[in-house]
Image: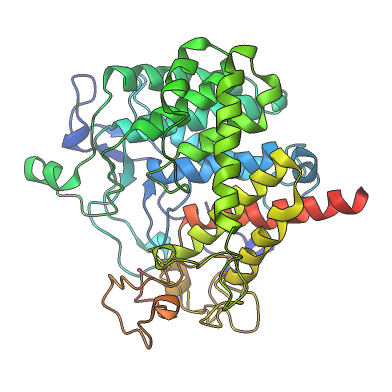
């Protein structure tokens, strides 16, 4: 959508990628939808530094933002952020989430329930403003990961937007129908991998934008089942939850979504049927055990943050790891009421805001030494010196996959504030969402604890 000056200030711009003319890529063709058939897939969020829209990465992003609302609805009911929908009797966070939700709903094939993996150019756009990027757009092959992420998001959305039936008539019901249809497709197609390299051997044009490929769908089945069970209370989904609840789990990433399912089950456990009690007890113990292990050694002493105790923390998108650590710790507090988790969670926010080995505030537009040159097309092409504010960049990444110049290659300082660096300085919705959660939930808790 166009960003008007009254909302975007200096960063106002024209509309880009209306996506009312999107082609069915040959990889996604079916008897009902032949190759190069035109569909409409408007709205949604640009994924990262590029202008494409990916269901898998939207999944964890949407889940994180709606979970923030579900954890603190009272706080978000009173949070206004100067977006076009402000004042419509719906929390701004849900207005924003709805913009991407409506796009996601266009990505489902209503004939069978499967979900297209992404809406994309065949190759990345140049470093231009969105209105100048006019290459053909495609929806590509359906996949199990995309379909299950979609099922999880729409099941959660059905629950969340049910409270706003007057403002959005039929939306909650439509989301639940879409979720169940997606689940049914995934049950029939439990192992459809989106393998872009193999796809490009068979179909033209070749697609070389972000793959977001995943080969293990146990976590996606668990998350989708957790959201559907919480929303419907139907035991068919509990069976899937019980299979996974005692398995190994790690911090959330776009391709590892066990914990979002756990968070939902814990958050709304009082509303779940008694048959889920044993699962809830097991999940609660797992989350607290993970949080306890995370804070056991007192964090990284060098810059007084819980994050960074291991070199393994410093991966592509390491700042998102820090924020997802904090979400785990905040969740442990919410289910235990033990304040020992709060300061470590806060320390990771301090880390991304500048209390780190690089000395940068990794959120654009804030602090005395913020990142100024993110790998983000609008921030590069708009001829404004300052980047769009409020964006969390990836952070130190000794993998340095972009082959740019890094002044330091040490683990904690392998970061360069250069728009060439997609490996350390790109922005992404699945990094910004946990920052959004942590900032707002810490603020909500501070207000809550003051009241107490």
Return the residue nearer the eye: 267 or 372: 267
Q: How is colour applied across the structure in the image?
A: rainbow
Which quadrant of the structure image shows residue 332? top right
Answer yes or no: is residue 450 visible: yes
- Give the residue displayed 31% in from the left and 70% down from the top: 399
Q: Is residue 237 above or below residue 84?
A: above
Answer yes or no: is residue 36 visible: no
Q: Which percent across, then down, holds residue 175? A: 53, 23
- Give the residue displayed 72% in from the left and 26% down from the top: 163
Residue positioned most to the bottom: 407
Q: Is residue 400 above or below residue 144?
A: below
Residue positioned most to the right: 451
Return the residue nearer the eye: 3 or 240: 240
- Give the residue displayed 38% in from the left and 81% down from the top: 410
Which quadrant of the structure image shows residue 41? top left
Q: Which percent across, then down, holds residue 288? A: 61, 43
Return the residue nearer the eye: 416 or 312: 312
Residue positioned most to the front: 297
Left or right of 39, for residue 305: right
- Give the residue displayed 85% in from the left and 53% down from the top: 447
Q: Which percent across, then down, holds residue 428? A: 45, 58
Q: Which percent across, then down, holds residue 202? A: 7, 40
Which quadrant of the structure image shows residue 446? bottom right
Q: How many marks?
A: 0
Return the residue nearer the eye: 379 or 415: 415
């Amino acid at each position: 959508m166009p960003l008007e000056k009254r909302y975007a200030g200096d960063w106002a711009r024209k509309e880009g990628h209306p996506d009312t003319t999107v082609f069915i890529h040959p990889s996604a063709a079916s008897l009902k939808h032949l190759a190069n058939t035109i569909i409409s897939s408007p709205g949604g969020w640009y994924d990262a530094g590029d202008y494409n829209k990916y269901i898998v990465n939207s999944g964890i992003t949407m889940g994180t933002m709606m979970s923030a609302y579900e954890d603190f609805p009272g706080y978000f009911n009173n949070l206004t952020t100067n977006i076009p929908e402000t004042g419509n009797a719906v929390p701004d966070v849900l207005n924003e989430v709805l913009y991407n939700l409506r796009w996601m709903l266009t990505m489902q094939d209503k004939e069978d329930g499967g979900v297209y993996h992404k809406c994309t150019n065949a190759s990345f756009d140049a470093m231009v403003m969105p209105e100048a990027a006019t290459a053909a757009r495609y929806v590509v092959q359906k996949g199990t990961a995309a379909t299950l992420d979609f099922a999880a998001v729409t099941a959660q959305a059905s629950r969340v937007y049910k409270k706003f039936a007057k403002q959005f008539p039929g939306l909650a019901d439509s989301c639940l129908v879409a979720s169940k249809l997606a689940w049914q497709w995934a049950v029939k197609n439990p192992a459809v991998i989106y393998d872009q390299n193999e796809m490009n051997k068979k179909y033209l044009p070749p697609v070389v934008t972000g793959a977001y490929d995943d080969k293990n769908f146990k976590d996606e089945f668990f998350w989708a089942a957790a959201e559907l069970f919480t929303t419907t209370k139907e035991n068919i989904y509990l069976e899937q939850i019980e299979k996974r609840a005692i398995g190994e789990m790690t911090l959330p990433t776009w391709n590892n979504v066990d914990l979002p399912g756990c968070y939902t089950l814990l958050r709304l456990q009082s509303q779940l049927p008694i048959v889920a009690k044993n699962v809830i007890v097991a999940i609660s113990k797992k989350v607290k055990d993970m949080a306890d292990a995370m804070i056991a050694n007192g964090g990284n002493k060098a810059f007084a943050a819980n994050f960074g105790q291991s070199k393994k923390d410093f991966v592509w998108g390491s700042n998102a790891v820090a924020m997802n650590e904090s979400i785990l710790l905040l969740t442990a507090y919410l289910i235990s009421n033990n304040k020992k988790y709060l300061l470590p969670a806060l320390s990771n926010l301090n880390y991304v805001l500048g209390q780190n080995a690089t000395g940068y505030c990794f959120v654009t537009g804030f602090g005395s030494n913020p990142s100024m040159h993110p790998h983000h097309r609008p921030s590069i092409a708009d001829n404004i010196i300052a980047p769009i504010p409020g964006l969390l960049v990836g952070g130190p990444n000794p993998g340095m996959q972009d082959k740019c110049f890094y002044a330091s290659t040490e683990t904690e300082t392998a970061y360069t504030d250069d728009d060439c660096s997609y490996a350390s300085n790109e922005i992404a919705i699945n990094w910004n969402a946990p920052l959004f959660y942590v900032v707002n939930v810490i603020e909500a808790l501070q207000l809550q604890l003051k009241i107490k």
